[in-house]
Structure formats: C-alpha cells, structure tokens
Image: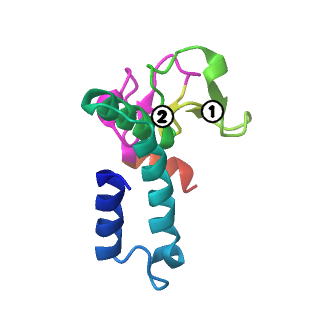
Amino acid sequence: MSNLVDHAKEELELAGLFDKDSDYDGMLGKAVMDLVKVFSKQGHSGWSAHQTLKIFSIVADYKPLTPIGKTEDEWMAITDMGAKEVVWQNKRRGTTFSRNAGKTWYDIDDPKLNNGDTWKRSWFKKLITK
C-alpha cells in the first residue's frame, strides 16, 4: 500500500468511520478509502494532486468550474408561471436564483457571487415558505 492509503486508513479508523455504529454503518470510511485508492493509483505529483483534488472537490459538490451564464437556457423557472413573481434557479449552480431568467442573480450561499440582484436571504426564505 502507498503512504497515502496507509495514512487515510489509519485516520479513518481513529475517527471511527469504519465502525458499524458510525454514520451510514461504516460505509463512509469505505467510500473514502475507495476514492483514496483510485487517487493513489493515479501517481500524481504534488502539483497535479493539488489540482486534481481542487477540481474534484468542485464538481463533486455540484458546483460549476466556469462562471455561470446569463442565457435563459441555463435557468429553470421554479415557481408557477402564474405566480406574482417568477423565480428562476440556475441549472449549474443550484444555490443561485434570479428574478429575470439570469440577467441578474443572487447566490443564497455566497452573497459575494451576487450579479446585480438585490435579494437577501431573508427575502428568499419568505418566498419559499409561502
């Protein structure tokens, strides 16, 4: 086994992630070990390992690698078209919403990604709880 595989196994064991009484009956530890073994076999250098992990983390978290677009086909209406205000959700970044099919938008998890919309989290919460 590689140093990485040995290290990961020891850390996961110490954290109890293989134990039957851990979350998902120890399956999280196994799932992580499967990923570590594949990653270890790829033989990355320090730089390619860093880049691979960074890119994997983004796509595995359902986030886009490139800026989201403003074209209407990248947005889906999530409220009834007969509603007072149509709300759109970005198909590539599910935490991003628009009131004008993507011309301006607001990300509820990362307000720094605001593209000109003035939504606030509290306003959005009121909308979805009605």
Left or right placement of residue 82 versus residue 21 in this view: right
Q: Secondary structure at mark 1?
A: loop
Q: Is residue 40 above or below residue 119?
A: below
Q: Which image quarter: residue 80?
A: top right
Q: Which image quarter: residue 1?
A: bottom left
The residue located at (45%, 59%) in the rendering is: 33
Residue that lies at the very extreme toward the front in this rendered image: 1
Q: Nearer the viewer, residue 30 or 79?
A: 30
Residue 13, given in percent of the width and then of the height, sits at 34, 74
Three-letter amino acid code of the residue under disc 1: Val
Q: Is residue 46 above or below residue 11?
A: above
Three-letter amino acid code of the residue under disc 2: Thr
Left or right placement of residue 127 versus residue 119 in this view: right
Q: Nearer the viewer, residue 17 or 66?
A: 17
Q: Quadrant of the C terminus?
A: bottom right
Earlier along the polypeptide chain: callout 1 or callout 2?
1
Residue 7, given in percent of the width and then of the height, sits at 28, 60
Verify CB contact (< 8 Å) between mark 1 and mark 2: no
Q: Report if residue 119 lies within the magenta region.
A: yes
Residue 31, given in percent of the width and then of the height, sits at 51, 60
Q: How many circles with numbers are drawn on the protein?
A: 2
Tell me the number on the disc at residue 42.
Answer: none
Compute the Cα span from label 1 to label 2: 14 Å
Q: Is residue 11 above or below residue 123?
A: below
Q: Secondary structure at mark 2?
A: strand
Q: Which image quarter: residue 5?
A: bottom left
- Disc 1: CA contacts within 10 A as few (<14), some (14-19) or many (>=20): some
- Disc 2: CA contacts within 10 A as few (<14), some (14-19) or many (>=20): many
> Which residue does the numbered mark 1 point to in the structure image?
86
Tell me which segment is drawn in magenta. 100-121
The residue located at (29%, 31%) in the rendering is: 45
Tell me the number on the disc at residue 96.
Answer: 2
